[in-house]
Amino acid sequence: MFWVTAVFAMILIGVSKAGFGGGVAAIATPLLALTISVADAAAILLPILIVADLFSLRHYWNVYDRRSLTLMIPGAIVGIALGAFFFGYFSDNERTLKVVLGAISLLFVAYQVARSFMLGALLKSKPSALAGVLLGGAAGFTSTLAHAGGPPATIYLLPQQLPRQLFVGTNVIFFFILNLVKLVPYGALGLLRVGNISTILILAPLTFLGVQLGVWLNRRFSDRWFTYIIYAMLLVTGLELVSGRSVIHFFVP
């Protein structure tokens, strides 16, 4: 089951990095955490996310909003430090980590459901510079725990009403920098293990296929129904992580 979920997660990471399907890559960590520990899931995914970022950078290099990055990155670094502290403090309590990861997954789905209702209010006024720093911090924290920093970043970037390519490019650059910074606390916490290298080498090339697929889909199709399906899967995965049992048990005694 690990390899089935891992291959699927890698394709979704690549597709998301290409700007298709919104934040569908948020399902990657929770999905892997169903079959391995949260720490191993996060550690395996980080180098792969960086590889996927590199594949995406060639499509969006020099396409970003400088002011947004200047505000968000300092806050994100503080958020990464707080996330690393949390990770280290609960490193021996796998159940707590799974519940927190599941809760982040459910909050992510809740945000996506509420997003259409929030959109009008968000677009009416641009967030302040302080909001950019704070939302960057929130993105850094959730990204450290679950590689799911998309919603806070989107809440800040969306009201800027950037052209789609500029919006996607800013996201790509922002999370590429975040993922590089996350290598430091992950290494300090002992999450980056030599034993994972072979797994990473096998899975990483799949993100390239995902990026190419995402770029192709981005130019030809709406991501609406694709996104709905993935978020439904994320909802189920989040419920399983929080409850500690298969969701089927909610319906079959």
Image: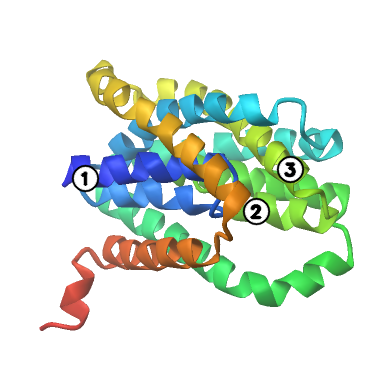
Which residue, given by chain and number where applicable, does mark 3 sit on? 165
Rendered image quadrant of residue 58: top right
- Measuring from the top left, give residue 152's x and y in whole percent: 65, 53
- Measuring from the top left, give residue 250's x and y in whole percent: 21, 80
N-term mark: 1 or 3 = 1
Category of crowding for the residue at label 1, using alpha-carbon neighbours closer than 10 angstroms: few (below 14), some (14–19), many (at least 20):
few
Find the distance from the CA under tag 1 to the CA under tag 3. 32 Å
In the displayed structure, 151 sits above or below 71; it is below
- Measuring from the top left, give residue 83's x and y in whole percent: 51, 41
N-term mark: 2 or 3 = 2
- Measuring from the top left, give residue 73's x and y in whole percent: 71, 34
Tell me which residue sits at (31%, 25%) in the image: 200
N-term mark: 2 or 1 = 1
Residue at the farthest front position: 220
Mark 2 is on which residue type?
Pro
Which residue, given by chain and number where applicable, does mark 1 sit on? 4
Q: State if disc 3 and disc 1 touch (CB < 8 Å).
A: no
Q: How many marks?
A: 3
In the displayed structure, 100 sits above or below 13; it is below
Mark 1 is on which residue type?
Val
Of the pair 199 and 35, the residue shown nearer to us: 199
Indicate the secondary structure of the residue bearing disc 3. Answer: helix
Q: Please indicate, yes or no, whether residue 86 appears anywhere in the rendered image.
A: no
Rendered image quadrant of residue 10: top left
Residue at the farthest left position: 253
Q: Nearer the viewer, mark 2 or mark 3?
A: 3
Tell me which residue sits at (66%, 38%) in the image: 76
Which residue, given by chain and number where applicable, does mark 2 sit on? 152
